[in-house]
Image: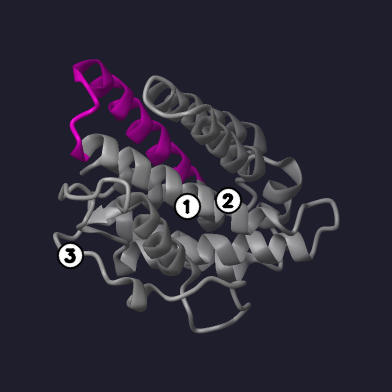
């Protein structure tokens, strides 16, 4: 599986569905994600970001098949809902960050996907891809374990695992993408490893456990399908 699939399935993926990209009319406009609404913010952001990026590759076929599939959309939407509700209930967390984190995940994943499709990742990047997948899988399994086993939450371990993911992804993108993309990566992990966010999500009496449970269900499906 390509790197972008690992990123979005675990924080993070845009999958190769071998379909032509939808038209601008299908994509529609922007706006704020409605809490509790029926729309998918992940799919909307993915399609709009793809349209903008793919406009730069003009006559090439690279990326025209980039669409966010239903499984990835569900995982991203539940991650967004978890972040959104955690920030609403905690004044020390920036309420604008969930939207930024989701946008950054989608944009980074698409850009890495385009690097792969344009064959801009060389043989030396293979080990970096393996390290990213290993690190993401470790985070995924930790999240599942902390949810399913009472009083098992280990904030220090999860923080180290997230930092390992950050370092692995940065190691891959630094030679290929701009400083802005590197900053996007840091913004994602700065929020996800925030102690206030982790405590609000994983403490045993957390009001966010129902949403965390839906996210864990998505992660388990990805693990069972071999996507992680």
**Mark 3 and mark 1: span between their CA atoms?**
35 Å
Q: Residue 144 versus residue 64: which sits nearer the camera?
A: 64
Indicate left or right for 19 with 107 as reference: left
Give neighbour class at mark 2: few <14, some 14-19, many 20+ (Cα, 10 Å). Answer: many
Numbered disc in front, either 2 or 1: 2
Please tell me whether mark 3 sits on a helix, a strand or a loop: loop
Relative image position of residue 66 (x, y in whole percent)? 26, 56
Q: Which residue is mark 1?
A: 144
* N-term mark: 2 or 1: 2
Please tell me whether mark 1 sits on a helix, a strand or a loop: helix
Q: Is residue 116 visible?
A: yes
Q: Residue 220 versus residue 88: which sits nearer the camera?
A: 88
* N-term mark: 3 or 1: 3
Magenta run includes residue 227: no
Q: Residue at position x 35%, y 56% from top?
A: 50
Q: Which residue is mark 3?
A: 20
Checking the image for residue 101, the label placed there is 2
Q: Are marks 2 and 1 in contact (CB under 8 Å)?
A: no
Q: Which secondary structure dominates the residues rendered in magenta?
A: helix
Indicate left or right for 90 with 176 as reference: right
Numbered disc in front, either 3 or 1: 3
Which image quadrant: the C terminus? top left
């Amino acid at each position: 599986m390509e790197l972008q699939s690992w990123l979005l399935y675990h924080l993070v993926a845009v999958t190769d569905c071998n379909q032509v990209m939808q038209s601008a009319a299908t994509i529609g406009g922007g706006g704020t994600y409605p809490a509790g609404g029926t729309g998918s913010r992940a799919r909307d952001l993915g399609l709009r970001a793809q349209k903008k990026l793919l406009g730069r590759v003009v006559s090439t076929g690279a990326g025209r098949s980039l669409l966010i599939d239903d499984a990835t959309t569900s995982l991203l939407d539940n991650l967004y809902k978890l972040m959104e509700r955690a920030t609403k209930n905690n004044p020390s967390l920036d309420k604008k960050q969930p939207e930024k984190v989701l946008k950054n995940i989608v944009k980074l994943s698409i850009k890495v996907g385009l690097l792969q499709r344009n064959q801009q990742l060389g043989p030396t990047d293979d080990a970096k891809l393996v390290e990213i997948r290993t690190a993401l899988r470790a985070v995924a399994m930790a999240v599942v374990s902390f949810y399913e086993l009472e009083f098992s939450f280990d904030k220090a371990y999860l923080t180290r695992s997230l930092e390992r993911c950050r370092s692995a992804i940065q190691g891959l993108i630094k030679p290929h993408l701009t400083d802005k993309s590197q900053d996007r990566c840091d913004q994602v992990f700065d929020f996800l490893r925030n102690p206030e966010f982790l405590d609000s999500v994983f403490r045993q009496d957390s009001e966010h456990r129902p949403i965390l449970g839906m996210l864990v269900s998505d992660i388990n499906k990805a693990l069972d399908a071999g996507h992680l």
